[in-house]
Amino acid sequence: MSILVTGGCGYIGSHMVYELVDAGESVVVLDNLTTGFHWAIPGEARLVVGDIGDEELVKDLVRKHNVEAIIHFAGSIVVPESVADPLGYYFNNTVKSRSLIAAAVASGVKNFIFSSTAAVYGAPREMPVKETTHLEPMSPYGSSKLMTEIMLRDTSFAHDFRHVALRYFNVAGADPRGRTGQSTKGATHLIKVACETALGKRPTMDVFGTDYPTRDGTCIRDYIHVKDLARAHMSALTHLRSGAKSDVFNCGYSHGFTVFEVIEAVRRASGVNFDVRTSPRRPGDPPEIVADSTKIRTQLGWQPQHDDLERIVRHALEWEDRLSRSKRNAPAMAVGA
């Protein structure tokens, strides 16, 4: 039996592949490599270069490799980009996910884990955010993910098919063993951008909006270490294998940091007082979003091991420095879904 990981050559996907391989699982990765890196996954995983929208390819992979579960990371993730190109996001994130789900059902795959996002909540009026909070995305990115959640819900009602949707908050950090990390050129992730600036890869960085109703005027986000997120997926896989029902879980630490607080953490870790500019707000950015992670802790038994901003930043810096000293920082952009 194998696990099929879509987008497994990207940032979060590659950490998941390592987590699965470390646990002794047989893994098949499906990635079109337009934004992922073939070197980001361990040699034990089988890489197939192809598109998740190709239903016949997916069905062939399920049959050849006896796939029992699909963990779906492939997709586009940049909120401002989604505002500028909504149709591209609905095609890549929603239409292609529909094809992947259809192939899974047709092939008899019963377990499916979906990489969703806290962006489905929009700008919530309650904090921290529960899974039952009203869903009102502020961007096509969030809407495209919510549409896939709805498709999964309805498919689970109609077929012998169970799913878990994991709503990520802000993912950061890198593999503590230095095997993979966020390798995106032109990244938009705050900690990645700050680390690049600290190491001289960028002359300066921008803070988008300093007039939010928060403690220092900048946005507040719940940062989760990518290793803990990968372990959350393992907990979800165990949940589905036990025959449990479909469900949705938040993935965060239940506390947040402002943009300025994150920048100061990177300055402390790097010892560099790098340049920061202030810019207007970006469309689609809520002032604050912090997870209520009670449900995943109690129902799946997930317990984070890296809930420390300094550690998250240190691992991100170590990976960024490794990229600087290697030839791996290629022009292609890594998937970060």
Image (cartoon, helix red, strand yellow):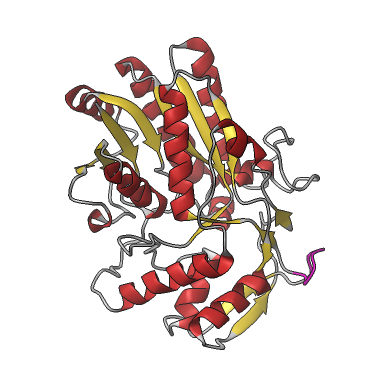
Residue 216 in magenta stretch: yes
Counting from the top left corner in percent of width and height, residue 42 is at 23, 51
Q: Is residue 38 above or below residue 241?
A: below
Q: Is residue 335 above or below residue 208?
A: above
Res. 282 image quadrant: bottom right
Residue occupying image coordinates x 39% and y 19%: 110
How many labels were placed on the picture?
0
Q: Which residues are magenta?
A: 211-217
Please tell me whether the stretch drawn in magenta is mainly helix, strand or loop: loop
Which of these two is toward me, 246 or 73?
246
Residue occupying image coordinates x 71% and y 69%: 209
Which of these two is toward me, 90 or 216?
216
Residue occupying image coordinates x 74% and y 72%: 210
Q: Is residue 96 above or below residue 140?
A: above
Residue occupying image coordinates x 54% and y 18%: 154
Left-right relation of 275 to 290:
left
Counting from the top left corner in percent of width and height, residue 188 is at 51, 64
Counting from the top left corner in percent of width and height, residue 223 is at 58, 58
Residue 91 visible in the current orientation? no
Counting from the top left corner in percent of width and height, residue 330 is at 28, 68
Res. 319 image quadrant: bottom left
Residue 201 in magenta stretch: no
